[in-house]
Image (cartoon, helix red, strand yellow):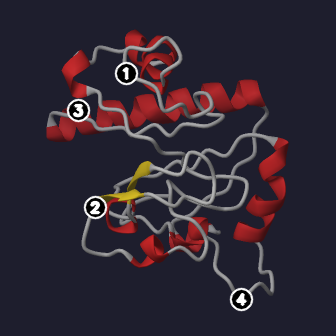
Amino acid sequence: MDATNNKVLEVFDTEELSVSLAKYTAVLSDKFAKERGSFTVVLSGVSLVKSLRLVPKDHPDSNDKLAFDGFLSMVPILPGNAYAINDALMGPDGHVASLFLGHPLLKENQKWVTHITDSPKPPPKRITFTFPVINSSSYIALVVCGAGKADVVQSAVGNGKNSDMLPVQTVSPEGEF
């Protein structure tokens, strides 16, 4: 990934990542609130918020609650304007959302949101964005956390000889990456 195709790779320690991501989000929030009167952000699960859990929205361990307590409660968002779905943005195998290497949903180009009932990673039943909606984004910050994902990040940004494109390599937003 390089700046010539709107992709920038930055590496941070955990504290720097938190500060940089908060600043990046604040700049975009201000920009779009002024230009369009609104700002939309999608947060993934896994290590960015916490492990995905398929529990009721009001359960103490729900991702919805974790996102609200850790982030959304600190910004002026009406509760009715926050929606939770079961998605991670990049897994240790290079999957994006719930779009896995070799799975037929990688080729879905009509639906923006769909379901998967045979996920190779638990839980088997998920709801996921598809590449048409992911790639329609004005800006994407693909935040990858944890040493366990270092090899797949290297594969995704490197010029490896692997003939199978990782799902993360299919992320190609209309705007800045």
Q: Residue at x 27, y 35 (%)?
A: 39
> Up-down: is 105 above or below 22?
below
Q: Using the image as rendered, state which of residue 153 and residue 21 is in the foreground.
A: 153
What x and y, as percent, mark residue 61?
A: 53, 17
User: Element at badge 3?
Assistant: helix
Q: Tell me the quadrant of the picture where the N terminus can be found.
A: bottom right
Label 1, secondary structure: give it. Answer: loop
Q: Earlier in the sequence, mark 3 or mark 1?
A: 3
Image coords of residue 18 (percent x, y): 64, 27
Q: Nearer the viewer, residue 145 or 91?
A: 91
- Mark-to-mark CA distance, 1 and 4: 40 Å
User: Mark 1 is on which residue type?
Assistant: Lys
Amino acid type assigned to the residue bearing label 4 in the image: Ser
Q: Badge 3, how many Cα within 10 Å: few under 14, some, many 20+?
A: few
Closer to the chain start, of discs 3 and 2, is 3
| Earlier residue among tags 1 and 2 | 1
Q: Which residue is mark 4?
A: 163
- x and y, in percent, of residue 8 in the image: 61, 58
Residues at marks 3 and 1, CA–CA distance in whole angstroms: 28 Å
Q: Which residue is mark 2?
A: 112
Which numbered disc, 3 or 1, marks the residue closer to the eye?
1
Cα distance between the residues tagged 3 and 2: 24 Å
Q: Is residue 69 above or below residue 163?
A: above
Mark toward the viewer: 1 or 4: 1
- Tell which tag, 1 or 2, sits nearer the viewer: 1
Q: Crowding at label 4, few (<14), some or many (≥20) Cα neighbours within 10 Å?
A: few
Label 1: how many Cα within 10 Å (few below 14, some 14–19, many 20+): some
Q: Which residue is mark 3?
A: 33
Residue type, label 2: Trp
Residue 35 — which label? none
Instruction: Tell me the number on the disc at residue 57.
Output: 1
In this view, the residue farthest toward the left is 37
